[in-house]
Amino acid sequence: MTVTSIPSRTGTPLQGGYPPAQAAKDALTRDLSAELAAQGVRVVGLRPNGLPETATLREAFQARATALGMTWEQWQASLAARTHPQRLSTLEELADVAAFVASERAGGLTGTTVNLTMGSLDD
């Protein structure tokens, strides 16, 4: 299982190598699935839209918010405004989907990335 993010599929300013690195994880998910499926190994990615309760999100994007002249709270609100329910994903929601994807009930999923962007990115 991999975790990627919206910049893997969209152009975004002030992120340097982050979007290409995320796109590489999407490609790795597909390639590993093609390579390992015959051995019964499924490979699935998850693409959430921000997880503000994680320290890594703030560490990664506080500087971007500052560069855009925004407070951390304003930056989070701008991300949430792009989603259909006007809020960001939670870590619990990501964990719930990860548990399902890892289960046999999701046996038909492989070589794909599950869109958890709450409507902010169309697949």
Image (cartoon, rainbow, N blue to C red):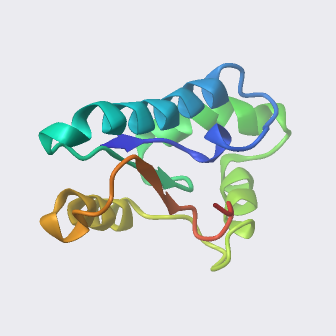
The residue depicted at 49 percent of the width and 64 percent of the height is 89
Q: Is residue 58 left or right of residue 83?
A: left
- In the depicted view, which residue is nearer to us: 111 or 44? 111
The answer to whether residue 33 of the structure is visible from this angle is yes
Residue 111 in the image: state x and y as whole percent: 39, 46
The answer to whether residue 52 of the structure is visible from this angle is no
Compared to residue 85, the image places residue 57 above or below, namely above
Q: Is residue 70 left or right of residue 25?
A: right
Q: Quadrant of the C terminus?
A: bottom right
Determine which quarter of the picture holds residue 22. top right
Q: Which residue extends farthest bottom?
A: 85
Q: Which residue extends farthest front?
A: 38
Q: Is residue 112 left or right of residue 88?
A: left
Residue 73 in the image: state x and y as whole percent: 67, 55
The residue depicted at 66 percent of the width and 19 percent of the height is 17
The residue depicted at 84 percent of the width and 38 percent of the height is 68
Determine which quarter of the picture holds residue 53. bottom left
